[in-house]
Amino acid sequence: MNLQFFGAARTVTGSMHFLEINGKRILLDCGLFQGRRAESTERNRTFPFDPKSIDMVILSHAHIDHSGNLPGLVKQGFSGPIHCTRATHDLCTIMLADSAHIQEKDTEFINKKNAKRHEPLIEPLYLPEDAAQALELFQGYPYEKEIDIAPNVSLRFVDAGHILGSSSIHLTIKEHGTTKTFGFTGDIGRWNMPIIRDPQFMGNVETLISESTYGGITHDSPGETESQLLVVLQTTFARGGKVIVPAFSVGRTQDIVYALHKLKDAGKLPSFPIYVDSPLAINATEVFRKHPECYDEETRKHILEHHDPLGLSQLQYVRTADESKALNDKEGPCMIISASGMCEAGRIVHHLANNIEDARNTILIVGYQAENTLGWKLVQHFPEIRIFGDILKLNAQVVVFNSFSAHADGNELLKYIGQYDAKQLQQLFLVHGDIARQEKLSSGLKERGYQHVGIPVRGEKVTL
């Protein structure tokens, strides 16, 4: 059995790992790489293998850095099954179509500017028909069901507690007369977060690939989210400004709406308009409502007592482009929640361009920002930021919350991995993290008796 790392190796985005088992070629995740535009374009357009040679994909969850290049894979010849949970299937139905639409529109917008500058035109990575073709290959399953996906290879999805439908992947493999166990954590969530359940342990394995996004970093408690959010709202509105929130359409947006709902129930939320400006987030919220089997007990109880935890009287969902553009003319305090979470595409980029130079405004960052993304530049407080080719001054206040993070922090990663028997776990590989975070997590794991910890580079191949 061979394992090779093609994405999210010593970086956070573009999750993609390759397994060769009993002659079958299996891809774990197929995500978009996000970073510098030229590097992203090259990595996302060029696969380090022949897509036609891949027999199947196993998808951990729907976030675009894990699922977003499946249409590209199909466009270049992949035709096998894509295995995932049922909720992930439903989310990808809207997310991949949205990704294709955004790429078309962003390409059109950029090409208008390039044409004026006499610069080369670009093409979208893939088209809506490629996303539709990819979705025909999806096969959705419940958690904890043992599924035979190839001769002598069975798959089980375990709730990772990261977003709706997110899973860790457990494989049982019979090879040369022996049985081997393999695990891929996907992205591990946090304990005591709203709406979805806590991460579940998949059981002991001999080989494990684990995410390491926040190794060595401690998040604020999830219990602080409402109080922190209220302070930002009050401070910004006292200046007469707007709160602009780049948020992933799946998970983060629903968590923010739920926190606002709880503030409203407690009588603490001031009266002001809230706009969720993301058709994808609106559609994703409907998918959330379809999958109560993923909810934790607190949310189930809240639904029984308060009906819809994702509904709020002062919240307005914005669907059309014209409605989105009209938000630029809104005066006075308001809150705009829009995608994408790393500010690399979609409507949030336009809202930032229109609001970044106003010192009354606050840009509230509630998710991880990969290096060299627009969101990362905001977090680093670059004094000037290029958006759509224009240089804009960063005058707005930038506030970063990690209490909303859907990723386990360093202590929580140690807690999760600490469930595995160190004697049985023969090989442990850290992915989906910057090298500094991975080294911190590796050090903590070795102190706890996990001696075989690897930090693979892109393209590294190992025999299991």
Image: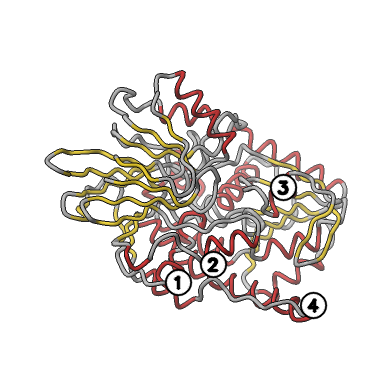
Q: Which residue position is annotated with label 3?
A: 364
294 vs 118: above or below: above
Q: Quadrant of residue 280?
A: bottom right
Q: Name the side, left or right, on which 338 lies relative to 143.
A: right
Q: Residue at x 80, y 56 (%)?
A: 385
Q: Earlier in the sequence, mark 3 or mark 4?
A: 4
Q: Which residue position is annotated with label 4?
A: 117
Q: Which of marks 3 and 2 is nearer the N terminus?
A: 2
Residues packed near mark 2 inside 10 Å, few (<14), some (14 to 19) or many (20 plus):
many
Q: Report, in whole angstroms, how far the alpha carbon at label 3 lies from the one at label 4.
A: 33 Å
* SS type, badge 3: strand
Q: Which residue position is annotated with label 1?
A: 131
Asked if the residues shown at circle 2 and circle 1 are in contact, with their CB atoms under 8 angstroms apart, the answer is yes
Rendered location of residue 8, percent (x, y)? 50, 48
In this rendering, the count of numbered labels is 4
Q: Report, in whole angstroms, how far the alpha carbon at label 3 lies from the one at label 2.
A: 23 Å
Res 99 label: 2
352 vs 233: above or below: below
Residues packed near mark 4 inside 10 Å, few (<14), some (14 to 19) or many (20 plus):
few
349 vs 426: above or below: below
* SS type, badge 4: helix
In front of the other: 8 or 63:
8
Q: Which amino acid does label 4 sit on?
A: Arg
